[in-house]
Amino acid sequence: MYTIGIDVSKKELVSAKVTKRGEIIERWTIPNEPVAIAHWLDALPHALLGAEATAEYHNELARQCIARGVPFKLLNPIVTKQFTRATVRRRKTDRSDAEVIARCLLNGDGYLLSMESLSPVRRLLRTAEKIRRIDCTLLRMEAQMRSFVKEADTGPLLRCARSVRKAAHAMQKQGLAMADETQTKLLSSIPGIGKTLSATISSEIGDCGRFGSGKALVAFAGLDPRVKQSGSTLSRNTRLTKRGSPYLRRAFFLAAMIGERSDPELKTYYEKKRAEGKRFTEATVANARHVAHRVYAVMKRGTPYVKKELSTTKA
């Protein structure tokens, strides 16, 4: 089976076909349009395709690949960027990007997409979150305006913020209405996770079966710490890789922050980390990893979460 790396843009797809040894044997440049993609895929031999994650420009290609049973992997741009940095010349063109993506696929990078991964729920909830950020920005601008120019008329900004807030609420409502009720109920059994967070987490994860362990899900969310090693020296820090979905990472963080108020296990662990000198964010991120493991267990088993009772007996 050949490997084909694809550099996706709004107007075209630039691809490179490589062998197992990484030798480039063929290239294509086709329009990023449904008909052109269909003709190209129908003429391809059995191959593994992959591309970097884009806003939405890779969606049509991914849908058609999945519909034809063609394996399609999505790569985080951070992975290809690190690969490019490791090369001597550090070239960056559409042709070289396609080669880099293909070689990253050969290394086993990326994750296979399924129809669940392209769920409209994720797009609706992501859009709602982006709009909500605009609302916050408008409110900050209004406050800054009043502090500098007391006689300024900030009414238009406030009316704009209200309209934006309504749009965010409408997008979120649509997304929640389309969410999988079974998954939502399962995830809502975990302390700190409500209806909105459960829908967000479920849509961002998609098929949980593609993760071999809870650690893999933690890494997918970018909650794993960076580790540097040189010779016998191993250096750990609290910076995160942030290589996964920022929306999933934020959902786990919010769930941990809420859970620390009501769940004894999360609260105890948070207090322990704080006593060790960790800051609020660092301690909550550590609990976010616990939440990710809980989510993995619940989705993998298909059964609700059972809260643990902490022992109060003294040895």
Image (cartoon, rainbow, N blue to C red):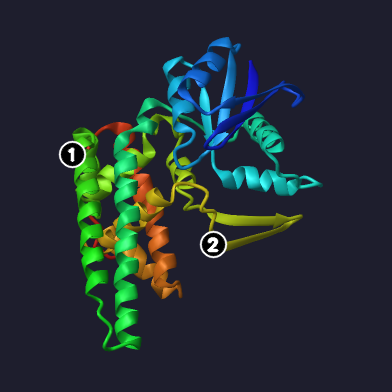
Q: Nearer the viewer, residue 257 or 137?
A: 137
Q: Quadrant of residue 145?
A: bottom left
> Left or right of 271: which side holds 188?
left
- Residue beneath disc 2: 239
Cα–Cα gap, marks 1 and 2: 36 Å
**Could you tell me if residue 53 is visible in this image?**
yes
> Left or right of 91: which side holds 261?
left
- Residue beneath disc 1: 177
Q: Residue at x 25, y 53 (%)?
A: 168
Residue 310: image location, x then y, percent? 25, 58
Q: Does 40 sit above or below residue 106?
A: above
Q: Residues within 10 Å of mark 1 (few under 14, many from 20)?
A: few
For the C terminus, which image quadrant? bottom left
Residue 64: image location, x then y, percent? 45, 21
Q: Residue at x 20, y 33 (%)?
A: 182
Q: Quadrant of residue 139?
A: bottom left
